[in-house]
Image (cartoon, grey):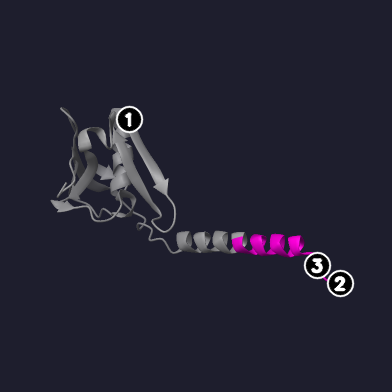
Amino acid sequence: MLLPERVKAAVFAGLIVLSAVGLILAAQTFRPQPPALTAGIPVSMQIEGAGWVITYSSNDTRNNTVHLFLLEAAHTLHFGLVWSNWSAPYSAVFIEGINGSINGEGGRWWVFWVNGTYGSTAADLTVLHGGEAILWRFTTPEGG
C-alpha cells in the first residue's frame, strides 16, 4: 500500500523539524561552559552610561563570566539590565540595555573591555579567572 502524497510530505516535514531541533541541541551541548569555581574570585567593574557611572567590585564572587558578574552587580545595586539570548549559530547573550540606556539611542551601543582588551566574544562566553577589571561603556562603535 502506497502512502498518499500529503502523508509523505507531512512525514518529510516532521523529519526536517526533528533534524533541526537535534542540530540546535547538539550545538548547545558543545557550547563552551565556564569552569566551576571552588572559591570566590576578586573582580571589579565600571559601567559608563549616558551621564552616569556605576562602579561595583567583589572580592569573593563565584560569577565567573562578564555576563554573570554584570547580573550580580545589577541585583546588588538595583539597576535595570536588559539582554536577549541569541540561539544558534551564535548561542550567546547580547546586552541590550543597562540602567535605562538602550542600544541604538544616539547611535550608541553597549560594549565592554576586560583589562583594557575589547570584548571579542559575548559577555556570557568571556570567562573571568580573578583579578580582572571590566569596563562597560555606552558608546558609538569603533569606526562608526
- Against 83, residue 32 (above or below) is below
How many numbered circles are shown?
A: 3
Q: Quadrant of residue 30?
A: bottom left
The answer to whether the residues at label 2 and label 3 have Cβ atoms under 8 Å apart is yes
The residue singled out by tag 3 in the image is: 3
Q: CA distance from mark 1 to mark 2?
A: 62 Å
The residue singled out by tag 2 in the image is: 1
Q: Amino acid at mark 2?
A: Met
Q: Amino acid at mark 3?
A: Leu
**Which secondary structure dominates the residues rendered in magenta?**
helix
- Point 15% across, 27% down: residue: 51
Mark closest to the chain's N terminus, 1 or 3? 3
- Point 41% across, 55% down: residue: 91
Q: Quadrant of residue 121?
A: bottom left
Check residue 5 for magenta coloring: yes
Q: Secondary structure at mark 2?
A: loop
Q: Nearer the viewer, mark 1 or mark 3?
A: 3
The front one of 65 and 87 is 87
Magenta highlight range:
1-16
Q: Amino acid at mark 1?
A: Gly
The residue singled out by tag 1 in the image is: 80
